[in-house]
Image: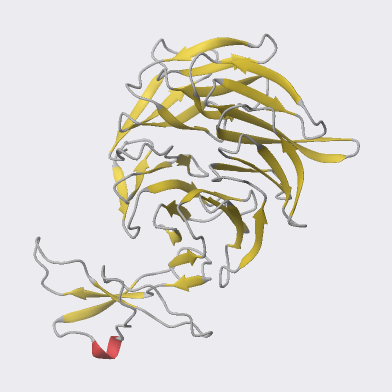
Amino acid sequence: STQSTWGTILQPMDAGAGSKRPFEVSVETSDGKRPRTEGGGGSTALIQSQHAPQNTQLINRPRTSALLAPIMQLVGHQAEVMCCRFSRDGAHLATGSFDKEIFIWNVYGECNNIAVLRGHKGAVLELGWSADGTRLVSCGPDKSVFVWDVEAGTRIRRWSEHRDFVNTCSAFSKSDMYGSYVDALSGDDGGLIKRWDGRQRRSVATLQNYYAVTAVCWTNTQDSIVSAGLDNTIKIWDMRKNAVSMELKGHQDTPTCLRLSHDGSYILSNAMDNTVRVWDIRPFCAADRCVKVFQGAVHNYEKNLLKCAWSPTGQRVAAASADSFVCVWDSTTRQLVYKLPGHRGCVNDVDFHPRESIIASCSSDKTVYLGELK
């Protein structure tokens, strides 16, 4: 089910620095679904504009996306939501949860849940879409990597060579004379990194890291891959030699996510040292490959593998934060431009819409939000 939230905001006219947050005006959808209200006590009462408190004024905000409302709340998972990813065309959002299920949602309209993918025997920790949006890769602590046919809602491949919890996976689309397919990477607690060919039942390459692997991602060429683990080091592996070709050091605690920039030149990393960093992975660059450090997102005792994301233009970066906020920075100035509230638990993943100014977030509070940015 989905819930749409406020379209206008009631703003106190002479609010001081210590005033409470603005009132929210909710609107009820045509099908009778109740919007989320601002109150922290879980009240479902609707605050209508005609009953507005005195000394307030209505502020209309121009819309910047095609979402049904500026903020959409997606409800349905029965446990912590660990990951969320937009499809490449932006029409769908996939979410994975501790309830062992993967939900596929429409991004536009009522944000209906159009499919539920079941098969994992444990939590779903990470997801990856194919470029054409027909395939989805998932992994979890059941030591398996799955490939799903999203249109049919069925599992088409299960790779189960891992002997330890699989923490991370990444998808890469390819094609041959018979059509398109998806290659995948996965990393586990035993330090194994495996490369999978969507046409084959067994892994095509295995790399051994000394420490547990917490994040993996492809580079643009597929000649190399990037991994991170408990040794606090980001490693670039040459797949032609099955060996490490570069090490990126700077994080003081475990990196929990890696994301490649859209031009393939930089890696974005989120880590348990409460920093988000940008690394230059081009073959020839200055000695210090850590080019930017962002601060504001935090990790806590839960030690979840919190994710990060690039905007489509690369002008902004975002990170999930354990303090229930979503942090968004300007990638050029490193200024924190948004610290988005709403969740009531650790935010585990964030993702930018590939075509519009929309950001998605999911949390341990079992909810998913879609919100438009300026």
Residue 9 location, quadrant: bottom left
Q: Quadrant of the C terminus?
A: bottom left
Tell which of 91 and 28 is nearer to you: 28
Q: Answer above or below: position of 276 versus 136.
A: above
Tell which of 246 and 273 is nearer to you: 273
Spot the residue most to the bottom: 50
Q: How is the image coloured?
A: secondary structure
Q: Position of residue 184 (x, y in %)?
A: 68, 32
Residue 73 shows in the view: yes
Residue 221 shows in the view: no
On screen, residue 273 versus residue 182, left or right, reads left
Q: Answer above or below: position of 361 versus 286.
A: below
Q: Position of residue 275 (x, y in %)?
A: 32, 31
Q: Answer above or below: position of 357 versus 272.
A: below
Q: Position of residue 298 (x, y in %)?
A: 30, 39
On screen, residue 313 versus residue 365, left or right, reads right
Q: Residue at x 56, y 10 (%)?
A: 245
Q: Answer above or below: position of 283 versus 115.
A: above
Q: Residue at x 46, y 66 (%)?
A: 72
On screen, residue 41 versus residue 215, left or right, reads left
Q: Residue at x 38, y 75 (%)?
A: 7
Q: Position of residue 309 (x, y in %)?
A: 47, 41
Tell which of 146 and 17 is nearer to you: 146
Count of marks overlaid on the render: 0
